[in-house]
Amino acid sequence: MTGSTPANRPHQSHNETATRYFEHSSAPRTNTDTIIVEAIRAEYPDLHLTVVPRFSLNLFSYAAAGHASIAPIDKEKDRLTWRTFIPPATRLYGQRGALADIVKLGKYLFDWQGKEFVVYIVDGRDGNSPYPQIVNQYVLSSSIEATNSLLFEAGAWGAELHDEIYVFDGGFWSKNRELWESVQNAHWSDVILDAKMKIAIKTDVLNFFDSRDTYEHLRVPWKRGIIFYGPPGNGKTISIKAMMHSLYDREQPVPTLYVKTLASFAGPEYSINQIFMMARRMAPCYLVFEDLDSIVSDNVRSYFLNAVDGIQKNDGILMVGSTNHLDRLDPGIAKRPSRFDRKYLFPNPNEKERTAYMQYWQTKLSDNDDLDFPDKLCPAIAKITNGFSFAFLQEAMVAALLSIARDKDVFIESVCLECLEAHKRPGNGRSCENESTRPFKGLYDWIWTVRQMDEEDGDLDNYLLWRAVKKQVRILREELGDEKGKR
């Protein structure tokens, strides 16, 4: 752009736009946008004006990301802002929040790739209703081609994910940075599963995204569906996250779309339409429905099935649904090919997998010099946790470690697993003379197993972690009741 800049060429000496805005906002009105357009054209008759709704693209976010520079050029009396307090996202690190301005009317100089634009931002909601919110950006330039180039690049940037994941909740999609950060900490090395099943899951998903040409050559729809099912706490969620991480690490990253619920202001049918509209736009993509049985209820099942396998193409979409209750899923979802084609059972871990999980914890605690965690404790803990899910195993370890940290000065004696008190074993051959605390079916068989292990290896009870874990496993077994491990 040559010659004087747009900011230096107003037709009038005062800010007519601000004047008209305040006059209009204080009187009956029908369309704020019309008033603003007329005022800007009167103020800058020689420049091209383009009206850009902020919901379609946000020039200020584009500039804040470092792609342009922006600075206010209006006087304070011609500007309208709301100053608000934003509380901290978390108090864990001592933050107290911050002050921020919400711009209702402002005028800015926008510099992008050596070209200058005058940009007004105006909250033009007519009436007192909070919805819909209408915030427009009014872009002035001497070149309509320059404006179009700016808007295209800003719009394309806004449509992309920037270390974010699309999350559907409450009837609309939003970009979530927190979930993306959580996924970056999820690795397949942290997932303890049967080795063959882990390979099969990874192969199924990765091969799908690598096989577009194969699907097209075979003239079959390029879409797949997978269901993870089994009792809660056995790795379904961490497997989904680890796969998400793997897909983001590809040379051509595959985005994830994560669905929390179909509940929305316009009903579940509207949500399903929005979900698959976005999935088709973002394809190839990984579309996640966690707790599928609770998301897709009977009253919306038909609409969901039509979206999955109806007239519209779903090329490039790989759906994964998880459920703790496969039997609650409609057969049209769980058993019909071309919808969810593969199902993977995540059962309670067997003894080998429980041992591997304890070895995982052993590695995590390897730099803790205050805690002895010898190799022999891994199979020992696995042996006394028959029927535990990974979630129960984790709770046993966390609770044991917390009890050690809290009571390390007094946590010396071994606790009786019948009465949960510390005392010496009676000399009459009995195990405990006190009344059992919160007994449950299978308690004495389990205690006998633990006691037999202690007698076979007298060194076990010398380890503080073993004594703490035994107690916590005893407590957790009350929650399991009379359920028995199947493996």
Image (cartoon, rainbow, N blue to C red):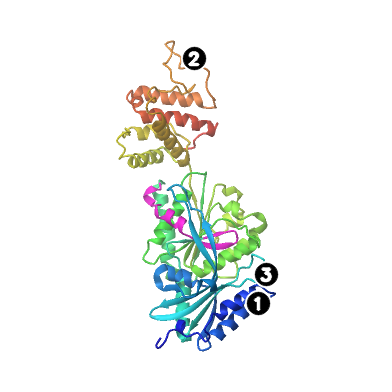
The vertical placement of 453 against 323, above or below, is above
Query: Left of 266 or right of it: where is 172?
Result: left
Mark 2 vs mark 3, foreground winner is: 3
Q: Residue furthest top?
A: 428
Q: Is residue 218 visible?
A: no
Disc with the residue nearer the chain's start (1 vs 3) = 1
Decide: marks 1, 3 in contact (CB < 8 A)?
no
Mark closer to the observer (1, 2): 1
Q: Which residue is identified by label 3?
A: 127
The reply, left or right, for residue 102 in relation to residue 405 is right
Judge whether residue 229 can be spotted in this image: yes
Residue 181 within the segment the image draws in magenta: yes
Which of the two residues, 450 or 224, is positioned nearer the viewer here? 450
Q: Quadrant of residue 468?
A: top left
Where residue 408 sits: x, y (%)? 38, 29
Q: Point out residue 150 in the picture as x, y percentages from the top left corner.
A: 45, 78
* Front-lying residue, 313 or 264: 264
Picture residue at 67% right of the left edge, 57% below the top:
299
Nearer-N-terminus badge (2/3) = 3
Residue under pointer 2 = 433
Q: Amino acid at mark 2?
A: Glu
Q: Which mark is residue 31?
A: 1
| Tally of numbered tags | 3
**355 relative to 73 in the view: left or right:** left
Q: What's under tag 1, amino acid-wise?
A: Asn
Q: Which residues are magenta?
A: 167-191
